[in-house]
Amino acid sequence: MALSVLYSVVPRRVLSSIYAGEFKVSSFGKLFLPPISPLPYHRFRRRCRSAAATALPADASTSVDYKERQLSGSPKLVALEYADLNLTDKSCEEIGHVRIRQHVNPLRSSLMAPAEAPNWDEVYKDTSLPLMVDIGSGGGRFLLYLAKQYPKSKNYLGFEIRPKLVTRAVHWASELGLRNIHFMFANATVSFGTVVSTYPGPLLLVSVLCPDPHFKKKHHKRRVVQKPLVQSIVDRLTLRGQVFIQSDVLEVANDMRDCFDGVPKLLHADAIDSNVLCDSDGWVLNNPMGIRTEREIHAEFEGSRIYRRLYEKVGD
């Protein structure tokens, strides 16, 4: 957001607290700042976003949607979305308060060794049930909700590359008494095939939902959806099994789409079922899962669009 735009929504006292001096706006709308050293850029942006979020628009008194956004905020919306889980606070005895890195390099040497498959009979009550795998399960609430809602239809497996999130999710699953869900600390890019191939039942659904975008071009090789992983998914997916992908970043969504489109044995869902509604570019308009991921909630709260694709395996 340009500073001249920020000035129109941020109260003067807030910007005065960012820069220890007066500033002026010319008749041409340009913002002149005093010749002093400002805060570090990331702290400046953080304060500006916070100030802009609290600045009232001209029609705030009549904007119901705006008031709801002000009262809730995306963290509270996440809690509301998953209220039925009745989860404890963001801490547990094993790990304490959870502070995590938002970005992890999956190509780090310590993450390149394939994870060992668990003893399926120990983690699941019924290993004959179809399996859903969520690649990049994050905080785990999305998968926990599905496991609680549908305890007898599927088993659920979450791959997550940040160990503290896995520890907390396992703690929550135990707290809820669920025997149809399991979380693994693993790099799915190198571990998916070796782990899933040992599961006794069929692989029915794989989801990759709002993965880390790794924006820099030199980091694109870190993105989780790569051709080898796509082939591993397709090879192990049962007939009529599905792959659901989504992102709030169009570039990442297009990148995943390029990896899955045209793969033999896979068709996009709208080519099979006319009830799957898509826009003119082929993005699925509605969330088929019935529950949003945490990232999805945050993105939609910020006004971002979610780009979705749903594929189905049609041949062996």
Image (spheres, rainbow, N blue to C red):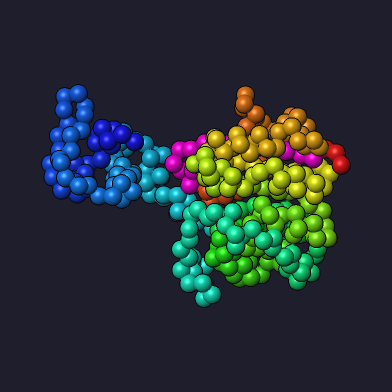
* Quarter of the figure with the N terminus: top left
| Image x and y of residue 37, in percent | 20, 47
Picture quadrant of residue 52: top left
Residue 27 in percent (x, y) is at 16, 24
Does the magenta run of residues contain 306? yes
Residues 153 and 117: in front is: 117
Q: Residue at x 33, y 48 (%)?
A: 42
Q: Please tell me which residue is depicted at 17% across the width and 31% down the height of the picture.
A: 25
Q: Residue furthest left?
A: 22
x then y, percent, for residue 50: 32, 47
Determine if residue 7 is in view.
yes
Work out which residue is located at the far right of the displayed protein and give it: 316
Q: Is residue 177 left or right of residue 267?
A: left
What are the residue bounds of the magenta stretch? 298-313
Q: Is residue 150 left or right of residue 171?
A: right
Name which residue lies at 40% across and 44% down: 69
**Residue 286 visible (yes or no):** no
Quarter containing the C terminus: top right
Whole-percent x and y of residue 287?
62, 41
For the residue pair 277 and 108, the one nearer the viewer reads as 108
- Residue 175 falls within the magenta-colored stretch: no
